[in-house]
Amino acid sequence: MKLTISIFTKFFLIFFANLLLFFTLPSIFEAVILFYLSSLFFLVGNQKRAFRWLLISIGCILLNHIALQFTSSLIGHLLLFFSSGLKKLLPVIIAGNFIFATTKISELFYGLKKLHLPSWIIIPISVLFRFLPTIRQDHQQIRNAMKFRGIAINRRDMIKHPLETLEYIYVPLLNNANNVASDLTASALTRGITHPAKSSSLYVISFKKIDFAICTITLLMIGGVIYARIQGS
């Protein structure tokens, strides 16, 4: 069953994920939070992303556990540094991917307007949401064109011939990215994104039972994070 989650609930999840950066939590609590955020993809009917993030979370937790067994060696320290940093950032990455994958640009714009954020914040975010999918599509088109010419057919060829990869793939991509950013900014301004008057929206954003449930669970987790912090100190 595919459910629709309010943009304001997604904003609250982003706030929660960023709040976790300021706390050091027990490993079991971190695992619960990672599984909770990953499972949200099941609610919106995106099982593929849900399983992917669950596997990444499990892999990160196992890697961190293994690294803790070899702290006496340099490689163990480097592995622990990498796994700990990734585990710390993973909630923010998952929450960011969730809002990117499940939110339409118009819905995001409407939500940011409702929060009364200034235009210098709304415009870059709106452009960014359109920019990344466009660049991903351009990258795939460039890769397909290079494969047709027998250049950088697979990732091994890209590693073996870095200069060709840079010249034929990434230089055109960076040049095109500059043009795309300019075009998207002009498009947003043409549509009146900076107009001070109250704008209408085709999307009706309502707070449903699923939003109430997610926010309640997230609030309980925030309380648990604060309690763990107090107990730890």
Image (tube, rainbow, N blue to C red):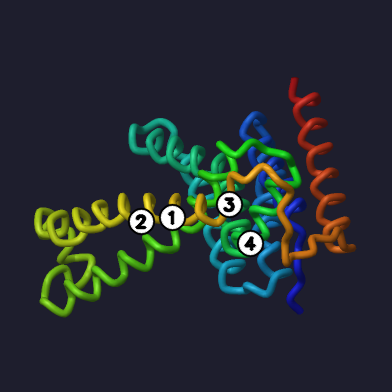
Q: Residue at x 55, y 51 (%)?
A: 126
Q: In the rendered structure, which disc, 2 or 3, sits on the residue that comes first in sequence? A: 2
Estimate the spatial distance between the alpha carbons at disc 4 and disc 1, rounded to whole Å.
18 Å
Q: Which residue is mark 1?
A: 184
Type of amino acid under label 1: Leu
Estimate the spatial distance between the alpha carbons at disc 2 and disc 1, rounded to whole Å.
6 Å
Question: CB under 8 Å between callouts 2 and 1?
Answer: yes
Q: Nearer the viewer, residue 157 or 231?
A: 157
Q: Where does the image place residue 186, in percent across and percent down from the top left?
A: 44, 52
Relative placement, left or right, of 204 versus 20 is right
Q: In the rendered structure, which disc, 3 or 4, sits on the residue that comes first in sequence? A: 4
Q: Which residue is mark 3?
A: 192
Q: Which residue is mark 2?
A: 180
- Where does the C terminus fall, quadrant-wise? top right
Q: Name which quarter of the figure residue 25 lies in.
A: top right
Query: Which numbered marker is on residue 103?
Result: 4
Estimate the spatial distance between the alpha carbons at disc 2 and disc 4, rounded to whole Å.
21 Å
| Front position among marks 3 and 4 | 3
